[in-house]
Image: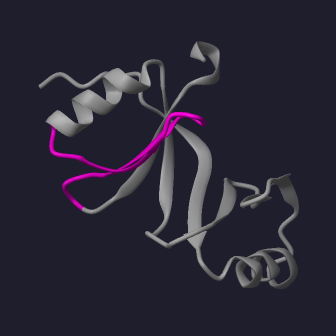
């Protein structure tokens, strides 16, 4: 099966937790990471090497982020290769998947293709 070579890792890692306010306090106060993005249910912290997004909600482990030129085509190819769609949100748009080996990742349309 041919997979597109256009998968490009972003600098983003997403952690979702139901203990959101505690997590924000930990990353902001204990680790002292500066906030780079603040939304109603997600906050981004700059670490120097990557941006850590802490999202409010039911946890599912760390999520790595990949940018693709065609999200729907990438999703079809990944599912055909054994990945499972965990969550999809067309409004953002994003798609969380788990690969056959347990890694969670998000694919999203690269900004130059949105």
Which region of the structure is painted magenta?
81-101
Residue sitting at the far left? 1
Q: Which residue is found at the position 71% from the left and 79% from the top? A: 23
Q: Quadrant of residue 81?
A: top left
Q: Quadrant of residue 5?
A: top left
Q: Which residue is found at the position 48% from the left and 58% from the top? A: 63
- Image spot of residue 113 (x, y percent): 57, 14
| Quarter of the picture holding the C terminus | top right
Q: Is residue 53 left or right of residue 101?
A: right
Q: Taking 73 as reference, is 42 above or below it?
A: below
Q: Is residue 11 left or right of residue 23?
A: left
Q: Taking 99 as reference, is 27 above or below it?
A: below
Q: Nearer the viewer, residue 3 or 18?
A: 18
Q: Which residue is found at the position 46% from the left and 46% from the top? A: 106
- Image spot of residue 100 (x, y percent): 19, 54
> How has the structure been colored for display?
one colour
Residue sitting at the far top? 113
Q: Which residue is found at the position 74% from the left and 85% from the top? A: 22
- Image spot of residue 69 (x, y percent): 47, 18
- Image spot of residue 75 (x, y percent): 32, 32
């Amino acid at each position: 099966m041919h997979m597109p070579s256009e998968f490009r890792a972003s600098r983003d890692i997403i952690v979702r937790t139901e203990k959101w306010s505690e997590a924000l306090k930990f990353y902001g106060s204990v680790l002292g990471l500066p906030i780079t993005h603040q939304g109603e249910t997600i906050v981004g912290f700059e670490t120097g090497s990557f941006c850590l997004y802490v999202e409010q909600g039911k946890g599912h482990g760390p999520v790595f982020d990949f940018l693709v030129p065609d999200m729907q085509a990438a999703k079809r190819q990944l599912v055909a290769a054994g990945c499972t769609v965990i969550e999809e949100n067309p409004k953002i748009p994003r798609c969380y998947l788990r690969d056959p080996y347990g890694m969670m990742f998000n694919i999203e349309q690269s900004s130059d293709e949105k």
